[in-house]
Amino acid sequence: MEPILAKQHYKLHVLSLLGIAFIMAIFGNGALWHSHQALLQWWLPAVSVLLLLHLGWRIRQASLSVGTTALYLDIKLCWVALLLCSGGDLINVNPLQIYHRQDTVIKHDYLIDSIWLFASGYGLLLWLLVRMLKREFSLTITQTTLLIVVAAVLSSLSYYQLYLPNISLYSLLLSAGYSFLVALLAVFGGWLAVQNLRLGLRLNYAVALGFILAMVADAIIGQFWLFANNGEGYFPIARHVNWIIYISSQALLLLFPIALIRTHTMNQHLR
């Protein structure tokens, strides 16, 4: 196992996060959800977010201690992206139980509000990923253009399947734009996996999977929580499934700083 991860007890932390997610999924339905709503809907997700931030900070500090100065900014921004996404998680908990705040069609429109933070966090990760691909794998303008076109097609087809008429312009613009962003994450993440075939670095495959799972998690939100059932959503089942995949994605993306360091080191040796 990667020495940094072993020292930070990465596996134990991830197993704890997944354990909490499955507890929420198993016991968070039906009568138990309503009788223990504070625990299952608010406190357990909050504990998970804090655990993610704690682990992310420890990996950040350990990565800074072994990485080159050229990667310091990238390593630090990885944790900033995690912090931004964590803010989105807290909005999605919806502690004030406010519905139809911005949209008369979509009940869980607080999910739309959280896009501001998730888009900032994922947008930052996308920028870091493109920087890595250019620096380590010589990403060209032609390749970038083709990947953007693929992402645009995927997001358009996906959004067409879930679109509801009569939603507010605010919901339309944010959800459509965000759909394109997470498609970009997945496509460029997939390209990282393809380019990594030369190096065979398992960390890069894990990070690529994390980017792809981020898109899957948000697709579940769109298809089954936000737009499904004529805007009512299938709640809380969709939330539980999304949370398991989302936590898995974030746990893998925590490896991004270490992947940056190991990829840079391997390429220097090969050159």
Image: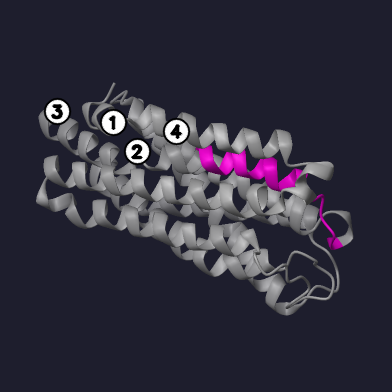
Q: How far apart are marks 3 and 2 (CA)?
A: 22 Å
Amino acid type, mark 2: Leu
Is residue 112 left or right of 253 when viewed as pictured? right
Residue ID for mark 2: 255
Q: Disc 3, disc 4: CB below 8 Å?
A: no
| Mark 2 residue crowding within 10 angstroms, few (<14) / some (14–19) / many (20+) | many
The picture quadrant where one finds residue 123 is: bottom left
Please tell me whether mark 1 sits on a helix, a strand or a loop.
helix
The type of residue carrying mark 4 is Val
Which residue extends farthest front? 35
**Residue occupying image coordinates x 75% and y 53%:** 225
> Where is residue 9 drawn, in percent x and y?
32, 30
Q: What residue span does the magenta drawing correspond to?
A: 231-248
Q: Is mark 4 on a helix, strand or loop?
A: helix
**Which residue is at the far right?**
230
Of the numbered discs 1 and 2, the one sitting upstream in the chain is 1
Cα distance, mark 1 to mark 2? 9 Å
Q: Name the residue under label 1.
A: 5
Are circles 1 and 2 on residues that touch, CB within 8 Å? yes
Magenta region, mostly helix, strand or loop? helix
